[in-house]
Image: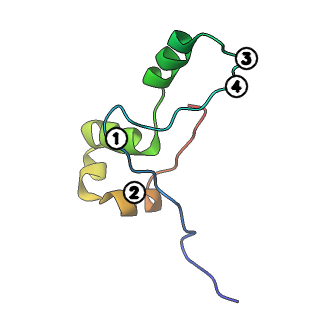
Amino acid sequence: MHEESPGVTRLQVHLEGEDLISWNEDEAPDAEDVMDRAASRNTKLTAYFKANEKYPEAKNLLYQDFPSKFVWQAKK
């Protein structure tokens, strides 16, 4: 067996406005509601860009190195 340190994190990559959107038709049958919610949420990639604007220390990190200094919290 082997150990990865730090743990390996899979990072999403997508074009602007073309991130993956999924929904349950029974819970959200209105496509406009689904699109509005998707536009307001962050992906790891968009959070990376926003962190670069907000935190000076983030500007020195490549996208693949970002998880070594910052933690993704999907619910926030």
Type of residue at label 2? Phe
Sooner in the amino-acid sequence: mark 2 or mark 3: 3
On the image, the x and y values in percent for residue 2 come to 65, 87
* Distance between mark 4 and mark 1 Cα atoms: 30 Å
Type of residue at label 4? Asn
On the image, the x and y values in percent for residue 8 come to 55, 68
Q: Which residue is mark 3?
A: 27
- Lateral position of residue 4 relative to residue 63, left or right: right
Q: Looking at the rendered structure, which numbered label has been put on residue 66?
A: 2
Q: Residues within 10 Å of mark 1 (few under 14, many from 20)?
A: some
Residue drawn at x 45%, y 21% is 40
Q: Considering only vertical position in the picture, is 7 above or below 47?
A: below
* Distance between mark 3 and mark 4 Cα atoms: 5 Å
Answer with the quarter of the image where residue 68 lies. Answer: bottom left
Sooner in the amino-acid sequence: mark 4 or mark 2: 4
Q: Which residue is mark 1?
A: 51
Label 3 near label 1: C-beta < 8 Å?
no
Sooner in the amino-acid sequence: mark 4 or mark 1: 4
Q: Residues within 10 Å of mark 2 (few under 14, many from 20)?
A: some
Label 4 near label 3: C-beta < 8 Å?
yes
In which quadrant will I find the N terminus? bottom right
Residue drawn at x 25%, y 37% is 53
Nearest to viewer (mark 1 / mark 3): 3
* Distance between mark 1 and mark 3 Cα atoms: 32 Å
Q: Which residue is mark 4?
A: 24
Type of residue at label 3? Glu
Callout 3: SS: loop
Q: Looking at the rendered structure, which numbered label has been put on residue 71?
A: none
